[in-house]
Amino acid sequence: MESSLFFLVAVITGGLFLLWMILYFIPIGLWFQALVSDVKISLLQLVLMRWRKVPPTVIVRAMIEGKKAGLELYRDLLEAHYLAGGHVAQVVHALVSASKANIDLTFQIATAVDLAGRDVFEAVQMSVNPKVINTPPVAAVAKDGIQLIAKARVTVRANIRQLVGGAGEETILARVGEGIVSSIGSAASHKEVLENPDSISKVVLNKGLDSGTAFEILSIDIADIDIGKNIGAELQTDQAEADLKIAQAKAEERRAMAVATEHEMKALAQEMRARVIEAEAEVPRAMAEAFRSGNLGIMDYYKMKNIEADTQMRESIAKPNDKKNNQK
């Protein structure tokens, strides 16, 4: 009794597994769904999709969606895109949205954009509903030296033709920032920029910043402008400090040269004094020689001594303070 019951359970389990295998490899329900949706696809092709590692559900649902939207989609192309690593459902959603919005988007372009790593469905949505990109604060200096910090809002929509190989949002932000800096830098005064902020938008828009990018710039609006530092005054202050340091260095150089010259003069004076002392030391010798040779007499010698004493007396009378100080 137990063996027959076990055999019955095994037969039922095996039958259910066999039925699951048949329904897995032969998706009759999916084929019937395609048939009632007026999508022509054979049951054999659905079976072969299993063997090609392509989920039939994804392909059939994509073909049904395209058929209901009035698009002609081919099974081979959908399978090839799936095997290439693409997102079939996203591509079909994008094609349907573009068709309803009267946007010229072909299957080849949509698959190329998808394989390039971009979200083609989001790109179509951005073409219908433009996107606003907020730039980070951009600092620039006008000709009068006043720094201005501007923030802009860039309204863009996707350029379907440029999605493959086109630059992204970072390039747009960099170019807009460069245009803002150039526009503010060319202004004669920061007051002109504050009075007419729309002049920045006009200058930036006329430069064609969206060329080579995956977006089309619709408008550039200056959201906010703040006054920053007085860069011109700071530069002048720094220059004045630098000039002062240079002048001080030159003055110190001249002082050092003057001190060196003074020391040289003192050394030269000492040298001259030494020569005078040396010359005075020769006087007694010359006088002794004059006495021996008879060129100098006693009376001449006394006269010379009297003159020296008279000279010393006159000098002491002319400088009494120096004498008192010396005595103290």
Image (tube, rainbow, N blue to C red):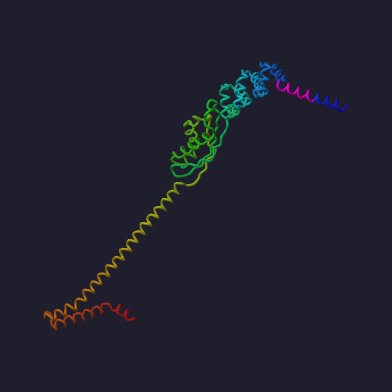
In the image, is residue 129 above or below residue 136?
Answer: above
Q: Which residues are magenta?
A: 13-25
User: With 259 as the anchor, is 307 left or right in this view?
Assistant: left
- Left or right, 260 with respect to 52, comes to left
As drawn, 193 above or below 328: above
Kindly indicate the quadrant of the structure image that contains residue 272: bottom left
Asked whether residue 22 is drawn in magenta, I would say yes
Taking 143 as reference, is 327 above or below it? Answer: below
Q: Position of residue 15 (x, y in %)?
A: 78, 23
Which residue is drawn at the image coordinates 24% and 78% (left, top)? 315
Q: Quadrant of the C terminus?
A: bottom left
Residue placed most toward the observer, 126 or 106: 106
Question: In this orientation, which residue lies closer to the viewer: 126 or 328?
Answer: 126
Q: Does the magenta-highlighted stretch encompass residue 246?
A: no
Q: Which of the two residues, 81 or 113, is positioned nearer the viewer here?
A: 81
x and y, in percent, of residue 68 in the image: 66, 19
Task: Give the residue at the far front of this rendering.
Answer: 3
Residue 236, x across and y down, in percent: 42, 49
Split into 4 quadrants, where in the image is the N terminus?
top right
